Amino acid sequence: MEAYGINLASCFRAVPGDSSSVVFWKERWLGGESLQNRFQCLYVLERKKNVKISERVKILDGSVVMNFNWLRQPATMDKVAELQNMSLELFAATLGNGEDRWSWELDDSGNFSVKSLKRCLQSARFSDLGNDFVWNNWIPTKVNFLAWRLSLDRVPTLAALAYRNVVMGETRCRICVLLDEEADHLFVGCELAQHVWNFVSQWCKISSIFAFRVKDILDWHKQVRGCRKWRKLVYAIMQVALWVVWQSRNDLVFNDKEVSIDRITNEIKQLGFLWIGSRLSLKEITWEEWCNLENSGKWL
């Protein structure tokens, strides 16, 4: 956890009940930080550093009563200001009944789950990818990495290899044989790529995809109409399409396997159903519905 800049202790927050076990100054229970960090001048004056909430704050007849034990009374402007601010928050604080408990901050339910911790770790791990690339956990890691490398123009196309003095012979696109095989050409400008994006737009029933760069493709989902999950689904499908185009290109270059637009579009559907379906548990959708993207409202 520490390796990714995540402090596990900060993921929990105390929810006071009878406040017999939560430390008033040192534990997070009021606001985003401990009172020790937020009101440092007052903490210096505290006589008992490990005092419990119940010894400093009580609810009597529905009113908040505070009972402090200072080494000396707050007298300077800074200390008086801190006391006023802290008192206002304490008056507004909600103290429950029963036992104190701890709330898990990474899930709206407040309950700890491995899934929420994993989501946090993934977010921290891939938060600094060198650009504004958006990670999509509905598809495999390898597909995300290809899209990420494309966003940084780090995919070994023939033109990119030639630029790095790696001799691969002819640098023209092996698919259309018209222009140099750069990433923007292979995944956007090439006739094959245009067929793929026309297929994706029709299949997903979104507006026609007009792009000039790979970055335009990776950002296209942001302007798609619909809910957040629908945009994420479109984004996942487009990333799968990038993966299939790259694999088809590799089969042509290294195995001399003919490129077929029909095979590519079928593979996009099949891999999308396999990868996305396994992560979303699409138990209610049939293969026929997936192929037509029908009734998406019932499984998104």
Image: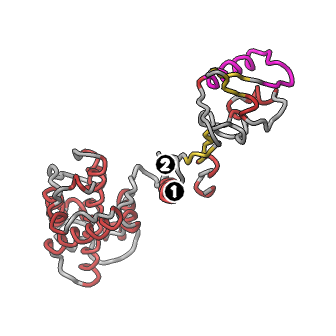
**How are the colours assigned in the image?**
secondary structure
> Pointers 2 and 1 in contact (CB under 8 A)?
yes
Q: Quadrant of the N terminus?
A: bottom right
Amino acid under disc 1: Ser
Instruction: Give the secondary structure at mark 2.
Output: loop
- Vertical arrangement, residue 102 with respect to residue 70, above or below: below
Q: Residue 285 location in percent, x, y? A: 22, 64
Q: Residue 11 location in percent, x, y? A: 58, 48
Q: Residue at x 30, y 78 (%)?
A: 169
Q: Residue at x 75, y 36 (%)?
A: 52
137 or 258, nearer to the observer: 137
Q: Residue 251 location in percent, x, y? A: 26, 79
Badge 2: few (under 14), some or many (20 or more) residues near its Cα, within 10 Å? some
Residue matched to label 2 = 107
Residues drawn in magenta: 68-91
Amino acid under disc 2: Asp
Task: Indicate yes or no whether the magenta region holds residue 30.
Answer: no
Instruction: Give the secondary structure at mark 1.
Output: loop
Question: In this rendering, would 272 be left or right of 279?
Answer: left
98 or 211, nearer to the observer: 98
Question: In this rendering, would 167 be left or right of 38?
Answer: left
| Quadrant of res 249 | bottom left
* Extreme residue toward the right, this view: 71
| Quadrant of res 272 | bottom left
